[in-house]
């Protein structure tokens, strides 16, 4: 009964092992002795016949069907079955049950264990063991397939309730995720600007409603903006690459720089973008808003001026068309002596930029000149600003005593309204009343200029590096101040 070295198959029922599958185990021929052979045949529960014949060299029994005491190993390592030994370990006896108990549980048993763990509460959980004969259905007949197993109705109800609870949890989590996503995607402006007071601080717009009207008016064209750096590289009107910020946040960044006076380094931290991106966005929106706002018809017609003129103007100077005045913005001192002399203002005793502003009697800015060097006079800036070309015959222009422009106005048929000049030691009663009336009315342009300078970008010295865009920023601030509403001549409250 030596071990065969060929490809062997075990002849025990329900055993499909072979030499190819277990090359390290031995397979043994049936014994030649008739009595022992008959014992083997009875042990494996197979009778010789047409379907089973014992042939030498082709009919084997696997060594695992013998007990360890029945097997002997020679010095050369060859395994043999002791004389008289009979196979005794099969699936249908104790050895078979032991093997089954060590095998992996069927899928329906494993599914039942997970099902109970998921459905039952902690107080109702029961330890789930292996299926035994006691767990089999009545009659001792097990289901033929795993999928044929059905849990009890009570467990199905518990599972249904648990599924409903989990579905509600999933819906709740989906809502939270959606809210967090929307919150992250919400423009930064609506996180900083919640009330109208916030909008006035960060943007200088009087309210959220006014800002919304302005945003809706510029959005169609702003959506096709090119970044300043890309516009420098190419003249093609192709869309810019994907923006790092929502378009409304780009406008908000520009307003924070101009209106709130926040530095570019601060804006870089707030909006979580690079410093170069901040500079590029501010330059882009400066150029864009200058083009858009500069195309608005600021100059009011004579009919519009008369329709919006306050009663005090109608009483003292009904022919007034515009109130003009000059204002100056301090700038850095250039190293060049020639530039210093051109920008030095004797009135401010500092280097400045100087501009002319004209307003209607209702307090709306209707004319904005470009900025000139601080050494220019009021008369010269009036001539170069081309405001005279907008005037018509019989128009009145109100100004202070420094504007000696009667001759220039007379060329277009307009008149100058200024306080009477003192020709004697004391003004007459009529001149005093006229001086007081003009002073009370002309102060309106001073309040408008103060409103423009409340854009905090003008708080400090204007760096010479801004000289290329200072005219654009000045015009933008003047036009945007109109969105705060006209001023009443009695105070700063909008009419």
Image (cartoon, rainbow, N blue to C red):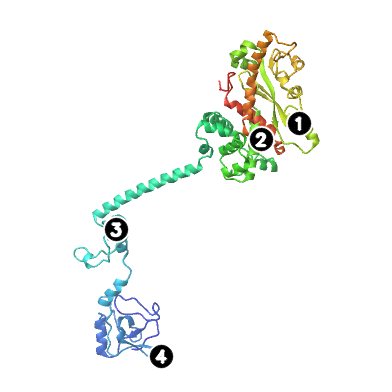
Between the C-alphas of marks 3 and 4, the distance is 55 Å
> Label 2 crowding class (10 Å Cα cut-off): few <14, some 14-19, many 20+?
few
Reading the chain from its start, which is encountered first: label 4 or label 2? Answer: 4
Please state which of the two labelled residues, at mark 4 or mark 2, is closer to the viewer.
2
Q: Are marks 1 and 3 in contact (CB under 8 Å)?
A: no
User: Secondary structure under badge 1?
Assistant: strand
Per the image, the residue denoted by label 1 is 344
- The number of callouts visible is 4
**What label does residue 460 carry, if any?**
2
Between the C-alphas of marks 2 and 3, the distance is 74 Å
User: Secondary structure under badge 4?
Assistant: loop
Please identify the residue farthest to the front as the structure is shown.
425
Q: Residue shown at 74%/16% (left/top)?
A: 409
Per the image, the residue denoted by label 4 is 76
Per the image, the residue denoted by label 3 is 116
**40, 432: nearer the viewer:** 432
């Amino acid at each position: 009964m030596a071990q065969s070295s060929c490809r062997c198959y075990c002849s025990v029922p329900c055993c499909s092992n072979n030499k190819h599958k277990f090359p390290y185990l031995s397979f043994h021929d049936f014994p030649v002795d008739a009595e022992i052979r008959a014992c083997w045949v009875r042990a494996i529960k197979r009778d010789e016949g047409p379907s089973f014949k014992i042939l030498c060299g082709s009919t084997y029994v696997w060594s695992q069907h013998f007990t360890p005491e029945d097997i002997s190993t020679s010095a050369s390592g060859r395994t043999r079955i002791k004389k008289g030994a009979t196979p005794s370990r099969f699936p249908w006896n104790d050895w078979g049950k032991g093997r089954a108990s060590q095998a992996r549980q069927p899928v329906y048993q494993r599914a039942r264990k997970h099902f109970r763990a998921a459905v039952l509460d902690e107080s109702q959980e029961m330890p789930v063991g292996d299926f035994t004969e006691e767990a089999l259905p009545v009659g001792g007949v097990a289901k033929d397939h795993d999928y044929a197993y059905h849990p009890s109705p009570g467990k199905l109800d518990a599972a249904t309730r648990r599924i409903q609870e989990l579905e509600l949890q999933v819906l709740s989590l989906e809502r939270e995720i959606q809210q967090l996503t929307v919150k992250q995607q919400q423009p930064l402006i609506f996180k900083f600007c919640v009330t109208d007071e916030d909008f006035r601080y960060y943007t200088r717009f009087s309210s959220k409603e006014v800002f919304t009207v302005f945003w809706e008016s510029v959005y169609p064209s702003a959506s096709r903006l090119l970044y300043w750096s890309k516009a420098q590289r190419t003249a093609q009107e192709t869309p810019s690459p994907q923006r790092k910020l929502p378009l409304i946040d780009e406008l908000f960044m520009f307003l924070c720089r101009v209106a709130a006076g926040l530095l570019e380094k601060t804006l870089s931290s707030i909006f979580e973008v690079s410093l170069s991106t901040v500079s590029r966005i501010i330059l882009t929106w400066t150029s864009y808003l200058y083009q858009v706002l500069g195309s608005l018809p600021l100059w009011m017609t004579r009919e519009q001026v008369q329709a919006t003129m306050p009663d005090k103007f109608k009483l003292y100077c009904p022919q007034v068309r515009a109130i003009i005045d000059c204002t100056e913005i301090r700038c850095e001192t250039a190293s060049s002596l020639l530039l210093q002399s051109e920008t030095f203002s004797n009135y401010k005793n500092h280097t400045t930029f100087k501009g002319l502003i004209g307003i209607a009697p209702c307090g709306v800015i209707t004319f904005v000149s470009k900025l000139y060097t601080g050494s220019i006079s009021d008369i010269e800036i009036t001539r170069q600003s081309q405001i005279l070309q907008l005037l018509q015959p019989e128009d009145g222009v109100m100004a202070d005593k420094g504007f000696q422009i009667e001759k220039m106005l007379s060329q277009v048929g307009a008149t100058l309204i200024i306080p009477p000049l003192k020709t004697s030691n004391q003004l007459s009663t009529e001149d005093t009343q006229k001086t007081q009336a003009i002073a009370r009315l002309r102060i309106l342009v001073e309040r408008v200029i103060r409103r423009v300078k409340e854009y905090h970008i003008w708080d400090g010295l204007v760096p010479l590096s801004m000289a290329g865009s200072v005219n654009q920023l000045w015009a933008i601030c003047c036009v945007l101040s109109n969105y705060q509403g006209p001023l009443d001549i009695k105070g700063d409250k909008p009419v």
